[in-house]
Image (cartoon, helix red, strand yellow):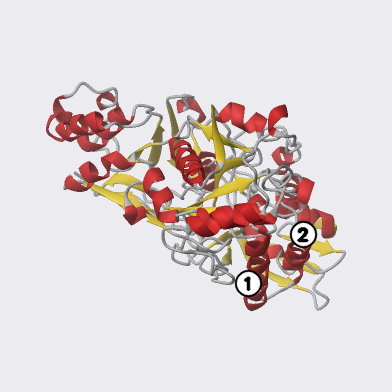
């Protein structure tokens, strides 16, 4: 739902009337309920972390499943379930020992066999996991607390992959992890800091998570997704409230403590309320991009792709997608604003306001002769829809025959797979987003033709560099490789960036301890606490 200006005025009035409004939640809330946190979240429809990359599924995974390694706030892998680990002199055998006190919610101990089965299942579907499995000679249990991954050839980023998969590497019971990755695990029994309350689950309405009293956290301070997972509340309840005004009124009234992703129109109202706070938890943000079809004219010609690169005014695109400039940034690195790999190599094309004359010249050099440029417009994703309209208008101003194709997200996800010409249902441009910076498991960063993400960019020089990523060991080597890759990318223009956005959450000030994290795939619920009122 999109909040209109009229709705915004109504929402402002809600500040004075919320306590007198009839509520769907008040009957469930008691005044002394200080150790229960109520959170307005998206509906949880996929519970198995191997079957979805959705943020809400990631968060469910963070709550009930533990993992071997996790990223700290700087994006650096840290041991989590692992107590200690080492690698052999030939760099082909990694040995991991689990820490003490790890038990599943059913009371059974976590063993090396559970870890081996979970890695193997994850390796069926995650890009980084597939790379590990392709190079693995053996993954085996050594004793109840120790397992090893033996490789056919060295893989310097193995631990990085275990910590930072596109899919969350949830450690499950062996009997659950033995299920194929394409079949959903239904038990919801992990060893994480929260237990999923099956009895109180109401699909489409609410989900309840209880503190796992048997969980033994690490001794380190919490840091991003890593460190000690200390749960400071007894229960977290996810409420599914689709109407944003209802959710906001409940937040103002104190009937819920947290709203994930409030609409931008409500930011001023939230900030004017002395009891509420806006906070950005996912510091990595989301990078919006424009994807061109390498297989069809005019963007099979590199000059036409370069034309769009010079044409885009990132600040203008950010304004129509995310109107509050405090939560947007321009971005020139294909690695986003990663604190490790972002760089400024070969970014001389960037110009405030764009360069329409340069773009027009490059289209002429590409031999563009007025062919239709077909742009997908996903009408049920407002930000992308707005960006598509601005793009069409910007192209038309320099003489490009741009045509919008309005459709639902569902229709778009089917039609974007068409590699044929426009007259046969194909396409030229679509708007998307991504948040990764690892070129092994971030689809946006592939340029291997038919095997690449939609748009099918192809550049052999870039791919040769990307292939080296798995075989270098140090951060400095990866930084150097990132610069080389980006230099080539901006020559062949694999995609065009539109800017980066940060999504604030809204919560009552009585709710504190929310952790900021480096990646944009949800956030953990440990460490948060609620002051008595």
Q: Secondary structure at mark 1?
A: helix
The C terminus, quarter of image: top left
Name the residue nearer the viewer: 396 or 268: 396
> Which residue occupies 57% across, 46% down?
65
> Which residue occupies 50% across, 44% down?
59
The reply, left or right, for residue 182 in relation to residue 533 is right
Relative height, residue 199 to residue 131 (above, below): above
The x and y percentages for residue 520 are 50, 51
Relative height, residue 18 to residue 489 (above, below): above
In the drawing, what numbered circle is on residue 143? 2
In the drawing, what numbered circle is on residue 452? none
Q: Quadrant of residue 257?
A: top left
Residue 225 visible in the current orientation: no
Q: Quadrant of residue 302?
A: bottom right
Could you tell which of marks 2 and 1 lies nearer the N-terminus? 2
The reply, left or right, for residue 384 in relation to residue 327 is right
The reply, left or right, for residue 112 in relation to residue 346 is right
The x and y percentages for residue 8 are 23, 34
Residue 390 visible in the current orientation: yes
Query: How far apart in space, not on screen, are marks 2 and 1 (Cα)?
Result: 43 Å
Q: Secondary structure at mark 2?
A: strand
Q: Residue furthest left?
A: 16
Circle 2 crowding by C-alpha within 10 Å: few under 14, some 14–19, many from 20: few
For disc 1, the marked residue is 483
Name the residue nearer the viewer: 145 or 522: 522
> Which residue occupies 41% across, 58% down?
353
Relative height, residue 423 to residue 299 (above, below): above
The x and y percentages for residue 474 are 67, 76
- Cβ–Cβ under 8 Å for marks 2 and 1: no
The x and y percentages for residue 43 are 47, 31
Name the residue nearer the viewer: 177 or 288: 288
């Amino acid at each position: 739902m999109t909040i209109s200006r009229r709705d915004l005025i109504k929402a402002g009035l809600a500040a004075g009337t919320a306590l007198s409004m009839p509520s769907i939640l008040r009957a469930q809330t008691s005044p002394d309920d200080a150790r229960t946190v109520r959170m307005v979240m998206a509906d949880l429809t996929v519970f198995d972390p191997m079957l979805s990359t959705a943020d809400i599924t990631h968060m469910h995974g963070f709550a009930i499943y533990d993992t071997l390694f996790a990223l700290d706030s700087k994006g650096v892998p840290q041991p989590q379930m692992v107590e200690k680990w080492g690698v052999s002199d030939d760099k082909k055998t990694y040995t991991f020992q689990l820490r003490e006190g790890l038990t599943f919610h059913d009371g059974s101990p976590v063993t090396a066999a559970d870890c081996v089965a979970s890695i193997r299942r994850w390796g069926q579907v995650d890009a980084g996991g597939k790379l590990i499995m392709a190079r693995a000679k053996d993954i085996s249990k050594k004793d109840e607390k120790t397992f090893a991954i033996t490789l056919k050839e060295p893989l310097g980023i193995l631990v990085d992959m275990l910590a930072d998969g596109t899919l969350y590497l949830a450690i499950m019971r062996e009997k659950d992890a033995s299920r194929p990755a394409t079949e959903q695990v239904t038990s919801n029994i992990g060893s994480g800091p929260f237990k999923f309350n099956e009895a109180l689950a109401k699909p489409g309405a609410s989900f309840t998570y209880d503190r796992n009293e048997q969980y033994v956290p690490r001794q380190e301070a919490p840091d991003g997704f890593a460190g000690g997972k200390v749960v400071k509340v007894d229960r977290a309840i996810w409420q599914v409230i689709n109407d944003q005004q209802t959710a906001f009124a409940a937040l103002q009234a104190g009937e819920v403590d947290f709203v994930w992703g409030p609409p931008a129109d409500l930011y001023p109202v939230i900030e004017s309320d002395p009891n509420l706070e806006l906070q950005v938890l996912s510091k990595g943000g989301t990078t919006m991009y424009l994807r061109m079809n390498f297989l069809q004219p005019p963007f099979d010609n590199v000059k036409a792709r370069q034309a769009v690169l010079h044409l885009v005014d990132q600040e203008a695109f950010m304004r129509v997608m995310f109107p509050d400039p405090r939560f947007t940034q321009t971005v020139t690195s294909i690695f986003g604003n990663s604190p490790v790999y972002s760089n400024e190599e070969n970014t001389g094309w960037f110009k405030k306001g764009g360069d329409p004359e340069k773009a027009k010249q490059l289209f002429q050099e590409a031999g563009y002769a007025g062919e239709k440029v077909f742009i997908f417009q996903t009408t049920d994703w407002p930000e992308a829809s707005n960006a598509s309209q601005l793009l069409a208008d910007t192209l038309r101003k320099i003489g490009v025959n741009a045509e919008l194709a309005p459709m639902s997200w569902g229709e778009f996800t089917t039609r974007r797979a068409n590699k044929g010409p426009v007259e046969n249902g194909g396409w030229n441009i679509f708007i998307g987003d991504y948040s990764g910076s690892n070129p092994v498991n971030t689809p946006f960063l592939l340029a291997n033709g038919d095997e690449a993400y939609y748009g099918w960019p192809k550049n052999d020089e870039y791919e040769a560099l990307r292939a080296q990523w798995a075989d270098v060991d140090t951060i400095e080597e990866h930084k150097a490789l990132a610069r080389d890759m980006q230099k080539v990318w901006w020559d062949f223009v694999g995609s065009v960036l539109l800017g980066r956005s940060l999504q604030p959450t809204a919560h009552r000030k009585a709710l504190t301890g929310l952790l900021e994290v480096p990646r944009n795939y949800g956030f953990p619920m440990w460490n948060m606490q609620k002051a008595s009122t």
